[in-house]
Image: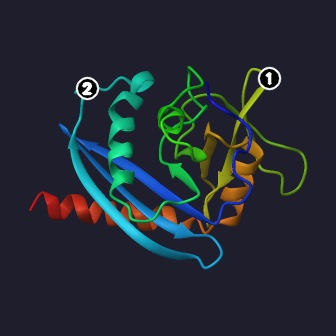
Amino acid sequence: MVINYDKSKEISSIGFLKIKIIEDNAYSGGLIFTIKEKKILEYKFRINQIRIPKYFPTILFLNQTENYLNLIKDFSINPDCYILNSSGQIHPYFFGAACDFGLNISKPVVGYTNKLLFGEKRENDEILEIPKIYQNDQLIGYAIPKPNSKKYYFISVGNNISLQTARDLFLKIDLTIIKILDRELNEFIKNSKG
């Protein structure tokens, strides 16, 4: 069962993880980032074959969890928290890849996506209030504005963290780190294909 409360008191380093599925391969990449120093400490990339060749969005985590778990074994640094480019509780079963990954480790996990695939974004009347994501009357995530854009990152709990802490964490980190990881992963994919 996913834990929606904070199991860690302080988060100073984060592991950002992302997977891209191309044909029969899962290209995964990650970096370890320090919040205070705003410094990347380590990058890791790997290629794995996917387990399920067809695209089934509701069970996508079956193709991702094992790849994420294999990737974090490659790091020499053990961060305080992981942020995955996968759904957490913003998911039709309230259980996306970030939740499945989170149940396999003891660290806090946050999931984010670039598109809202489940739930409803509700604007708030208060100035500077972050839009909330609801399913019926249940708060399941937040829409964090992307830097210099009208678009959002849609975040939700993966495991071992409260939704409010996940929101506060996203608001205090330099979100350009997500673009850096995406760029580095694309470069790894390009170089892997020769």
Color scheme of the displayed model: rainbow
Instruction: In this rendered view, identify the residue nearer to me: 117 or 171.
Output: 171
Q: Residue at x 41, y 63 (%)?
A: 181
Picture quarter containing residue 67? top left
Distance of mark 2 from mark 1, alpha carbons? 34 Å
Direction right: furthest residue: 126
Specify the label residue 137 is tagged with: 1
Amino acid type, callout 2: Ile
Depicted 164 relative to depicted 91: above or below = below
Depicted 193 relative to depicted 57: above or below = below
Q: Residue at x 59, y 46 (%)?
A: 110
Q: Residues within 10 Å of mark 1 (few under 14, many from 20)?
A: few
Instruction: In this rendered view, identify the residue nearer to me: 99 or 78.
Output: 78
Depicted 28 relative to depicted 115: above or below = below
Image position, residue 123 (x, y; %): 79, 42
Specify the label residue 52 is tagged with: 2
Amino acid type, callout 1: Asp
